Amino acid sequence: MPDMSASASLALTHLVTLAEVDEDKVTPGVLGFLVFAVMALAVWGLMKSMNRHMGKVDFTEAPEPEPGPGQAPGEPGAQRG
Protein backbone atom coordinates (compact mmCIF):
# COMPACT_ATOMS: atom_id res chain seq x y z
CA MET A 1 0.00 0.00 0.00
CA PRO A 2 1.52 3.36 -1.00
CA ASP A 3 2.23 6.08 1.52
CA MET A 4 -0.76 8.49 1.30
CA SER A 5 0.65 11.10 3.68
CA ALA A 6 2.85 12.63 0.96
CA SER A 7 -0.02 13.05 -1.50
CA ALA A 8 -2.29 14.39 1.25
CA SER A 9 0.38 16.89 2.24
CA LEU A 10 0.76 17.98 -1.39
CA ALA A 11 -3.02 18.39 -1.72
CA LEU A 12 -3.17 20.48 1.46
CA THR A 13 -0.44 22.83 0.25
CA HIS A 14 -2.45 23.46 -2.93
CA LEU A 15 -5.61 24.14 -0.91
CA VAL A 16 -3.81 26.47 1.48
CA THR A 17 -2.72 28.69 -1.40
CA LEU A 18 -6.34 28.90 -2.54
CA ALA A 19 -7.51 29.78 0.96
CA GLU A 20 -5.09 32.65 1.48
CA VAL A 21 -6.87 35.83 2.50
CA ASP A 22 -5.53 39.24 1.62
CA GLU A 23 -5.99 41.37 4.74
CA ASP A 24 -6.19 44.57 2.63
CA LYS A 25 -8.97 43.30 0.37
CA VAL A 26 -12.52 42.92 1.69
CA THR A 27 -15.28 41.47 -0.47
CA PRO A 28 -18.91 40.68 0.40
CA GLY A 29 -18.74 37.21 -1.13
CA VAL A 30 -21.62 34.97 -2.09
CA LEU A 31 -23.54 35.53 1.14
CA GLY A 32 -23.47 39.30 0.63
CA PHE A 33 -24.76 38.88 -2.92
CA LEU A 34 -27.57 36.58 -1.79
CA VAL A 35 -28.65 38.98 0.96
CA PHE A 36 -28.63 41.89 -1.49
CA ALA A 37 -30.59 39.90 -4.09
CA VAL A 38 -33.25 38.88 -1.53
CA MET A 39 -33.60 42.49 -0.35
CA ALA A 40 -33.89 43.71 -3.94
CA LEU A 41 -36.63 41.17 -4.69
CA ALA A 42 -38.47 42.16 -1.50
CA VAL A 43 -38.37 45.87 -2.41
CA TRP A 44 -39.54 45.07 -5.95
CA GLY A 45 -42.47 43.04 -4.57
CA LEU A 46 -43.41 45.78 -2.10
CA MET A 47 -43.34 48.44 -4.83
CA LYS A 48 -45.49 46.28 -7.09
CA SER A 49 -48.00 45.71 -4.26
CA MET A 50 -48.04 49.42 -3.39
CA ASN A 51 -48.66 50.33 -7.02
CA ARG A 52 -51.58 47.88 -7.15
CA HIS A 53 -53.10 49.26 -3.94
CA MET A 54 -52.65 52.89 -5.00
CA GLY A 55 -54.52 52.09 -8.22
CA LYS A 56 -57.57 51.13 -6.14
CA VAL A 57 -57.64 54.43 -4.21
CA ASP A 58 -60.34 56.92 -5.22
CA PHE A 59 -58.99 60.45 -4.90
CA THR A 60 -62.25 62.32 -5.46
CA GLU A 61 -63.42 64.21 -2.37
CA ALA A 62 -67.00 64.41 -1.30
CA PRO A 63 -68.42 67.94 -1.49
CA GLU A 64 -68.77 69.76 1.82
CA PRO A 65 -72.38 70.11 2.98
CA GLU A 66 -73.93 73.53 2.71
CA PRO A 67 -74.14 75.32 6.08
CA GLY A 68 -77.63 75.58 7.54
CA PRO A 69 -79.33 78.87 8.48
CA GLY A 70 -78.16 78.77 12.14
CA GLN A 71 -74.67 77.51 11.43
CA ALA A 72 -71.53 79.49 10.63
CA PRO A 73 -69.82 78.57 7.30
CA GLY A 74 -66.73 76.98 8.91
CA GLU A 75 -68.45 75.47 11.95
CA PRO A 76 -68.49 71.64 12.12
CA GLY A 77 -71.42 69.60 13.39
CA ALA A 78 -75.09 69.26 12.66
CA GLN A 79 -77.65 72.01 12.97
CA ARG A 80 -79.67 71.87 16.19
CA GLY A 81 -83.28 72.72 16.04
Image: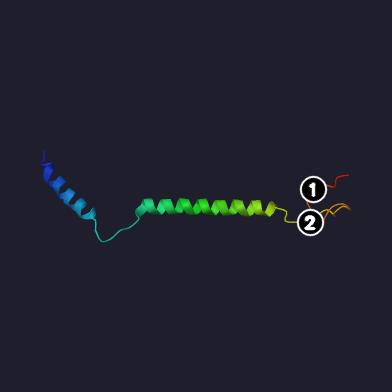
The outermost residue toward the top is: 1
Q: Label 1: how many residues lie within 10 Å, few (<14), some (14-19) or many (20+)?
A: few
Number of marks in the image?
2
Give left or right: position of 63 versus 49: right
Residue pushed farthest bottom?
24
Identity, as a three-letter code, of the amino acid under mark 2 = Gly
Q: Identify which residue is drawn at 79% across, 53% down.
A: 75
Residues 18 and 54: in front is 54
Q: Position of residue 50 (x, y in %)?
A: 61, 52
Colour style of the rendered protein structure: rainbow
Name the spot of residue 10 as percent of width and height, x first: 15, 50
Name the kind of residue labelled 1 in the image: Gly
Of the 4 image quadrants, the one containing the N terminus is top left
SS at circle 1 = loop
Check contact, mark 2 vs mark 1: CB within 8 A: no
Q: Nearer the viewer, residue 35 or 75?
A: 75
Residue at the (24%, 56%) spot, across then down: 21
Q: Position of residue 45 (x, y in %)?
A: 55, 51
For residue 77, which numbered disc appears in the image? 1
Across and down, in percent, residue 78 comes to 82, 47
Image quarter (top left, top right, bottom left or bottom right) of the C terminus: top right
Q: Which residue is mark 2?
A: 74
Q: Is residue 48 left or right of residue 5?
A: right
Real-space CA distance between mark 2 and mark 1, rounded to the nearest whole angstrom: 10 Å
Write the residue at 16% across / 45% down.
8
61 left or right of 81 in image: left
Q: Secondary structure at mark 2?
A: loop
> What's the residue at 18%, 48% (across, down)?
12
Question: Mark 2: few, some, or many residues within 10 Å (few <14, many ≥20)?
Answer: few
In the rendered image, which quarter is residue 54 located in?
A: bottom right
Q: Nearer the viewer, residue 61 or 32?
A: 61
Q: Nearer the viewer, residue 32 or 68?
A: 68
